[in-house]
Amino acid sequence: MRGPPVGNASAGRNRVRVARAGTDPLRTRPMASGPAERLRALLTPEHPDREQVADLLDGMTHGARMEAITSLSGPALQTKLYAMAAPAPVVTQADLVPPDAAPLREVIFHGKNTLPMFSLFQKRFCRPPADRGADELWGYNEQVNRLFTGPGFFVAHHEGSELVIDYRVLPEARPEELPAGWPGIIPNSARLSYFIYNGTVDVMRRVSDRVSIGRAQRNGKPMDNWFVLCRI
């Protein structure tokens, strides 16, 4: 009867396999496979690498980017992403609405916020008519509870070096001066809008060419609300 392998011989063969692979099996981890897993893996370190995150997102298809950003549930990873994006080039109006877009042409961004429920939404932007403010964009929020929460109209403009989505200001537009299909403008102090949009400002930061992240402020004080936007 053949006895069990000699311990030293077995260990030697194992060392050969480790040497050939060039890795320590105790230190290896499963490779992140899907878009969500790859993005979350890059956000695992205390200080994520901004360029690696941007390159990953820029190299994805729109569908993969959407899968990645909608996996960022809750504040933990979005807080880290917002801090990571602080030194990035500032978000500009051209990042939200292309410079060659005609006035009132709708540009849709898909969003994921850090709320525990109803966290998926859209922000829809447009450039005002030519005879209106050239230094601002108009927009509103589209989501499943809009009839209850209100459309959350806003004006996007620069405050200092930062681009903000400003709910304190409403587009100065008649219904016929809005893109087709947009709801009518109502004050952000009406309905449940009072608790969601009224008096708030979202400060935007760049994550990649098509992805940005915002944090809400009210009365100049940051709130514990973040959201990621991805342009179609």
Image (tube, rainbow, N blue to C red):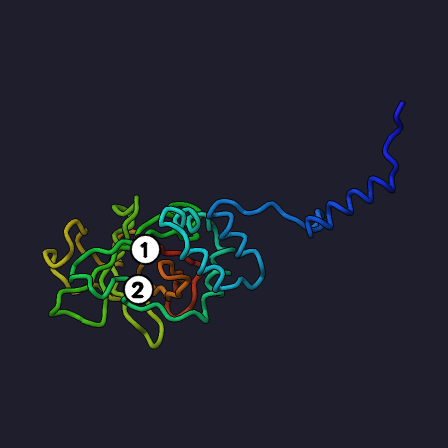
User: What residue do we see at 63% from left, 47% from top?
Assistant: 29
User: What residue do we see at 42% from left, 55% from top?
Assistant: 57
Q: Quadrant of residue 190?
A: bottom left
For label 2, the residue is 95
Q: Are marks 1 and 2 in contact (CB under 8 Å)?
A: yes
Q: Is residue 221 left or right of residue 25?
A: left
Counting from the top left corner in percent of width and height, residue 203 is at 37, 66
The quadrant in which the N terminus is found is top right
User: What residue do we see at 18% from left, 52% from top?
Assistant: 182
Looking at the rendered structure, the kind of residue marked 1 is Arg
For label 1, the residue is 231
Q: Secondary structure at mark 1?
A: strand
Counting from the top left corner in percent of width and height, residue 80 is at 51, 60
Q: Secondary structure at mark 2?
A: helix
User: What residue do we see at 30% from left, 45% from top?
Assistant: 145
Does residue 225 lie above or below 68 as drawn? Answer: below
Does residue 152 lie above or below 117 as drawn? Answer: below
Looking at the rendered structure, the kind of residue marked 2 is Asp
Q: How far apart are the alpha carbons under marks 1 and 2?
A: 9 Å
- Sequence order check, earlier mark of 1 and 2: 2
